[in-house]
Amino acid sequence: MNGWRGSLRADPLPWLLERGDPAVRHLALRELCDEPEDASDVLRAQESAMRSGPIAATLAAQHPAGFWVKPGAGYSGKYTGTVCR
């Protein structure tokens, strides 16, 4: 193993690529395996991540039009707006 993986006792990549956590799989494919954004495995993992776990729960909490507090730039509602400064 080369690079950062050479310092580890075992290769974590098979574990990170498991299908049990699609968000982790998506990031591992993109950031560690250097798969292109439009690769079919990457797209499937991303779509699955958007439908499960914390990503799906966060998106479900939004207003159907895509905001949390009120429509617009997203800066109003400290800590609750779409964009928090």
Image (cartoon, rainbow, N blue to C red):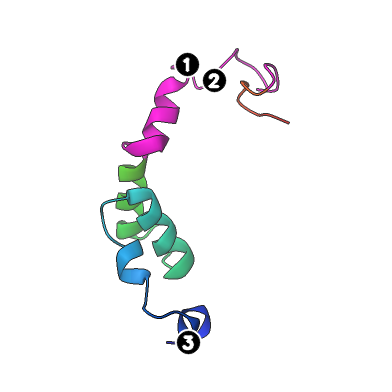
Helix, strand or loop at mark 2: loop
Q: Residue 10 appears in which quarter of the rendering?
A: bottom left
Residue 72 in the image, given as x and y percentages of width and height: 65, 17
Tell me if residue 40 comes above or below residue 55 in the rendering. Answer: below
- Confirm whether the magenta stretch covers residue 64: yes
SS at mark 3 in the image: loop
Q: Are marks 2 and 1 in contact (CB under 8 Å)?
A: yes
Q: Quadrant of residue 76?
A: top right
Look at mark 1 in the image and give the residue it sits on: 63
User: Of all residues shown, which one is farthest toward the top?
Assistant: 70
Residue that appears at 43% across and 17% down: 64
Q: Which residue is mark 3?
A: 2
User: Is any part of residue 51 visible from this angle?
Assistant: yes
Q: Indicate the quadrant containing the N terminus: top left, top right, bottom left or bottom right.
A: bottom left
Q: Could you tell me the amino acid type at mark 3?
A: Asn
Task: Identify which residue is drawn at 65% across, 22% down.
Answer: 74
* Label drawn at residue 67: 2
The reply to whether the C-beta atoms of the residues labelled 1 and 3 are less than 8 Å apart is no
Looking at the image, residue 43 sits to the left or right of residue 85; the answer is left
Quick one: 14 or 38, which is closer to the camera?
Answer: 14
- Residue 29 in picture, x, y percent from top left: 39, 63
Specify whether 3 is left or right of 18. Answer: right
The part of the chain drawn in magenta is: 50-78
